[in-house]
Amino acid sequence: MIYPVMLAGGTGSRLWPLSRQLNPKQFLKLTDPKWSMLQSTVVRLNGLPVQPPLIICNEEHRFIAAEQMRQAGFQGAHIILEPCGRNTAPAIALAALQLQKARQQGEEDPVMLVLAADHLIQNVTAFQRCVQQAGTLAQADKLVTFGITPTHPETGYGYICHGDPINECGHTVKAFVEKPDVETAKSYLESGNYLWNSGMFMFRAGRYLEELGKHRPDILAACEAAMENVSQDFDFTRIDEARFAECANESVDYAVMEKTDAAAVVALDAGWSDIGSWSALWEVSPKDSHGNSTSGDVMTLDTHNTLVRADSRLLATLGVDDLVIIETKDAVLVAHKDKVQDVKKLVAQLQANGRHEHLNHREVYRPWGLYDSIDNGERYQVKRITVKPGAKLSVQMHHHRAEHWVVVSGTAKVTNGEKTYLVTENQSTYIPVGQVHSLENPGVINLELIEVQSGSYLGEDDIVRYEDKYGRT
């Protein structure tokens, strides 16, 4: 059996404004209208002999990760929460330690398939065949990395120089090399001995820990200490924050793969892309006869080789070429395709200016549903709130704001001080400042309501939780 491990950490900024710190690339539907990148990564394993996935993600992304696994039919997914980012070597160590801990007496050392949760693979059949080939090497105690067969002299990826063949599908690793300049990349392509470094791996959990302990015992010790004091919270495993914070920040390439003599590489030619920029998404997306890739309510005229995505309104283009135009409810990006690598500079500027558009969308997901901030002013804010059937917001109180709720659809069960009552469609209720209250959906359809907040301070941190079924404080 194969134990898939999804690395879903990180808060990438290169696909802003669609990607946000609290809703990054791995949770977005970029290449498939049905599935997010994380869901696609799990779904493409269907047909392989795999256990339910183990997901490593940030604490702040836990609910969206769990909900997306539920939507994809993977209720058995296990989620380890990283209290802080420490790169891939520690993240994989946490997964390996968890698998070793869960192993029953007499069971074999589990084979881990480590995948980034935000990569595109277009040829699933070729990918699965490659995984099965790599599994043979992993069972022979090799630490396998997947190298992508290059299609052009790419300067944005690291490379793997392969050595002698081990069997019909794998080679030894001669060297890992950093991102090259154009001329060097051309020489790599011409030699036929170099593959792009995909950041995907396959090995036994115990073998990885053994090699990590040999080359970076400090990382292994910190991860073991962090896993000694874990707590279980629904589908989530919480590790010791203080111990993990002491761990070095290092990639698995630097910590293990470049040092071990057990490394092997298997070439993967399956339409892979890391979707590392808007231009990369344009390259792999379907296009019209003018080279345009469009999504949403889009009209184009005299437009060529352009990526256009509309989230909430009509977006029309006229007489433009080689652009990226991305519209969301609260931000619009217009960039030349040659400049998209600098999008992260815009995000850094937003952060430096104290703005919030890099953090989250106007539409914010919560474990009980979502809310959309429709309008706001100096002393008021209007939200459209959706509560899933059976879900309940925390029992809470606000020091600085009152709330007026108008039910648009469904039925709300409201606790307002000492009273509990139902509010149905076209009815409303008022929550005074300082009143302990809660909101619940007792029905079988979504509860939709409009919330009008008013007061001297309307921040999300003006909340005192007395009781919460999702473990929040």
Image (cartoon, grey):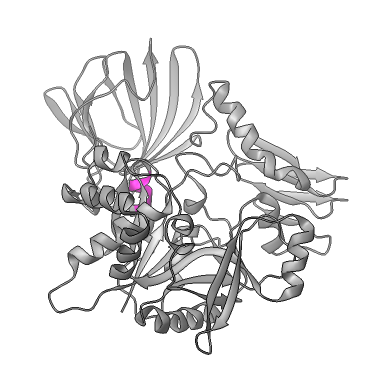
136 left or right, relative to 207 = right
Q: Which segment did they paint magenta? A: 61-65
Q: Give me the residue at 42% from left, 54% from top.
A: 88
Of 396 and 144, the residue lying toward us:
144
**Vertical relation: 171 (above or below) 249:** below
Residue 450 percent across, percent down from the top left: 40, 31
Q: Residue furthest top?
A: 456
- Horizontal and vertical percent position of residue 436: 18, 22
Location of residue 68 with respect to 63 vertically, above or below: below
**In which quadrant will I find the N terminus?**
bottom left
**Residue 62: percent from left, percent from top:** 33, 47
Residue lying farthest to the bottom in this orientation: 168
Is residue 338 on the magenta stretch?
no
Q: Nearer the viewer, residue 236 or 311?
A: 236
Relative height, residue 325 to residue 353 (above, below): below
Q: Residue at x 33, y 37 (%)?
A: 425
User: Does residue 62 show up magenta in the picture?
Assistant: yes
- As displayed, is residue 455 above or below residue 453? above
- Residue 123 can be seen in this image: no
Q: Nearer the viewer, residue 185 or 113?
A: 185
Image quadrant containing the C terminus: top left
Q: Is residue 441 visible?
A: yes
Residue 42 is situated, as x and y percent measured from the top left of the image, at: 42, 67
The quarter of the displayed image where residue 235 is located: bottom left
Residue at position x 17%, y 50% from top? 228
Direction from residue 197 to residue 264 in the image, left or right = left
How many tags in the picture?
Answer: 0
Q: For the stretch drawn in magenta, what is the main secondary structure?
A: helix
Determine whether, in the image, residue 171 is placed left or right of residue 185: left
